[in-house]
Image (spheres, coloured by chain):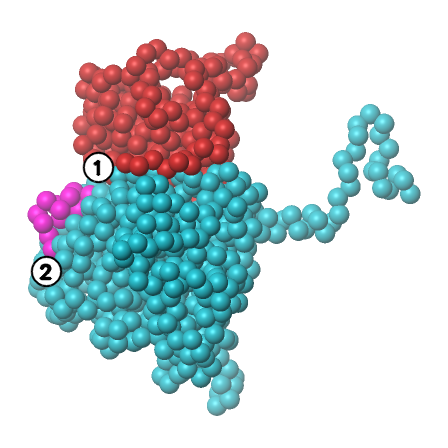
Chain colours: A cyan, B red
Amino acid sequence: MSSTLNGPADAAAPAAPRRSKRTELLEQRPVNRDGFVDEWPEVGLVAMEHDGDPTPSVRVEDGRIVEMDGRTREQFDFLDTFIADRAIDPAVAEEAMAIPPVEIAHMLVDPKVPRPEVIRIASGLTPAALLEVVKTMNVVEMMMAMQKMRARRTPSNQAHCTSARDNPLQVAADAAEAATRGFDELETTLGVVRYAPLVALGLLVGAQAGRPGILTQCALEEATELSLGMRGLTTYAETISVYGTESVFKDGDDTPWSKAFLASAYASRGIKMRFTSGTGSEVQMGNAEGRSMLYLEIRCILVTRGGGVQGLQNGSISCIGVPGAVPSGIRAVLAENLIAAMADLECASGNDQSFSHSDMRRVSRSLMQMLPGTDFVCSGYSAVPNSDNMFAGSNWDAADFDDWNVIQRDLKIDGGLRHVEEGELLAARERGARALQAVFAQLGFPAITDEEVEAVVYGHGSEDLPRRDVVEDLKAAQRMTEDGITGLDVVRALDAGGFPELAAGLFDLLRQRVAGDLLQTAAIIDREGNTRSAVNDRNDYAGPGTGYRPEGARWEEMKRLRFVTNADNPEA
Amino acid sequence: MSTTPTAGAETTPTPATTPTPSAVPTGASGPAGGVSERTLELVETGPAGPGTRPDEVVVALSPAFGTFFHRTIVDVPLATVLRETLAGIEEQGAAARVVRFFGGSDLARIAHAGAKLSGSGVSIGILSRGTTMIHQRDLPRLSNLELFPQAPLLDAEAFRAIGRNAAGYAQGHSPEPVPVRNDFMARPRYQAKAAVLHLKETEFVEPGRAAVELDVRIS
């Protein structure tokens, strides 16, 4: 028997230990292609339970916070100062800080404690105190809390529309499809940043061709992003990053005050805007100051509130591989979403970046937000194949549409999407592509050919499209900036190019900026053209039988799938 | 400008103040194009000043490039990275100069600082793990000409193409951008490792230390 155990008897070469077939099989599973790392507390490579985090404390004198989380005002860094002066209500701080963290966690979970009361108490909590609250909670309790605490009653979803070749036509057609499938916000970004104005134009036109009222944004360097917004080529902004340590903030040439100034620039033009942050960014950039990822993220959340911004995209976002690689990291990601909601901010809750090779991990990570519902369950579901995703891949992509719809139907939870018949999709894609073709022709840009339009209507990704002349397109993109082409010019081009209805829809969208309704927390424009926000669609969850539940026409729509057997015609 | 009392205090920096020959020379540098791995020697020749050649591309390296680190995140030897980048620049007939930055480990900072020293205003910034950017001094620091954010996808050929394009910009042309590769599973596999590598590189940052010019010897 010993020869079987030890392999062929070969005195010279020591035999490798015999492997179990089961271990070999497990090692081939997708989950083992993910990267995992051990905690490294000294540099902050810890999700949310870290001895290096401060102990909660607060002292208020003359209506001013003079001590916070063990530091006096003289010891404050600029985040502490900004948070103490702008984000915490000194009138509530001592009352709130006197409540044991576990009791606040009970208030979060208990449906009988109304959301406004939890918001009031949370407005007096310091970063370390907020951390202590969520540390007492498991993920089911956090989901319970999220169901009550999200700002908008109706959940929604947001998509990425990008192209590996920065092809504006592909972005237009995919935006039209994404809008038809139910996404309320669409964003794009670039491989080559100089393509930005042209791709932002493709997204704007394509989205409106899908359905009027879809908001669009283009993730770029912040000054360029602002310029596109001011010119009406985008209708919201999201990629305004804030960080949890002073040194990382400075690396971006920024302070909380400069970010608040940028926020006010958007507000001055009536443009919807949210900040972006997430666990892991500071440790990824090498300056976590020995704190846990979640403690630093809580500082970002409070900087957002202090800046007067209506909302935040968080949930680790582009750093998801970092919390995803350490123990309890995905729980920390849910905790940061919950704390954003406790800060009374719109929360676009992540699920927007490739996270795992394992389909099981992909889904379990997303159920944390999908089950309770958030303002945007994904802050970037890839409406294009991930091979075309220039945000470096999303946790969900165009190949997952049917899975998403089935999960919604199985659990009767609203993830914002619907199944759309192919004919309707093709019509939307063609409308988006033709509209952009007309706009290009009107503006004298390099022609979009009929062959390209046909390819994009029936194609899946950029590989299915004829190549465009990139150098000529880049000249057109540069001209857009030099000539100062605005959203209004796009309206005119659509009108003159034979798309008067699209022109009218886009004009209405630009007019929203004057009304300012989109500046309210968690605002979207619904399919009836109404602005829906935490003001007129306030989350009123108060336990079983209350709050948002899919019903009526929306539930009927959610029941439809690609293949469903029907008793009237069971052989179909 | 208050300083955070704990910044970096818990880590024990082990700065390599003077770059030392990175690897043990193998087999008398081996036959030309041989299989043995190239070695990279980076010798400091003095402070890096502004360049005068109008067609110059500055290659700006991160603090631990070729000293603590010898390979990118996917094991491309840094000797190869630098050799191919320089070959790409030379192939276009432009001039190259290699400098090292100690003041930070942030790619935009390194690349933009390099661009400011460059006679043409064009630079290539490269981090030890392979992340690379072509920058131009008149652009905002957080913008760039071309960015290659996914280090796991950069191979020898990509670095040569990046060198060629940077040279093209330096000569006043508008080259077609190097095709950006995209692997949406790079993050799940490499992001946490990249964080660890970056934290390591950051331990070599020496705030306030000026950039130095490097003599590059690849054998």
Q: For label 1, count other residues whose C-alpha is less than 10 Å away and answer few (under 14), some (14-19) or many (20+).
A: few
Residue B165, disc = none
Residue A530 image point, x, y percent: 22, 75
Label 1 to label 2: alpha-carbon separation:
28 Å
Chain to which the residue tagged by mark 2 belongs: A
Residue B140, disc = 1
Q: Secondary structure at mark 1?
A: loop
**Contact (Cβ within 8 Å) of mark 1 with mark 2:** no
Bounds of the magenta span? A473-486
Residue A302, quarter of picture: bottom left
**What is the chief secondary structure element of the magenta stretch?**
helix
Q: Quadrant of the N terminus of chain B?
A: top left
Q: Is residue B155 magenta?
A: no
**In this rendering, would B105 be left or right of B135?**
right
Using the image as rendered, state which of residue B196 and residue B23 is in the foreground: B196
Q: Residue furthest bottom?
A: A568
Q: Secondary structure at mark 2?
A: helix
Question: What amino acid does circle 2 point to?
Answer: Leu
Question: What amino acid does circle 1 point to?
Answer: Pro
Residue A502 image point, x, y percent: 17, 68
Residue B111, quarter of picture: top left
Q: Residue furthest front?
A: A62
Residue A488, disc = 2
Residue drawn at point x = 18 percent, y = 58 percent: A267
Give the number of the mark in front: 1 or 2. Answer: 1
Residue B60 image point, x, y percent: 33, 25
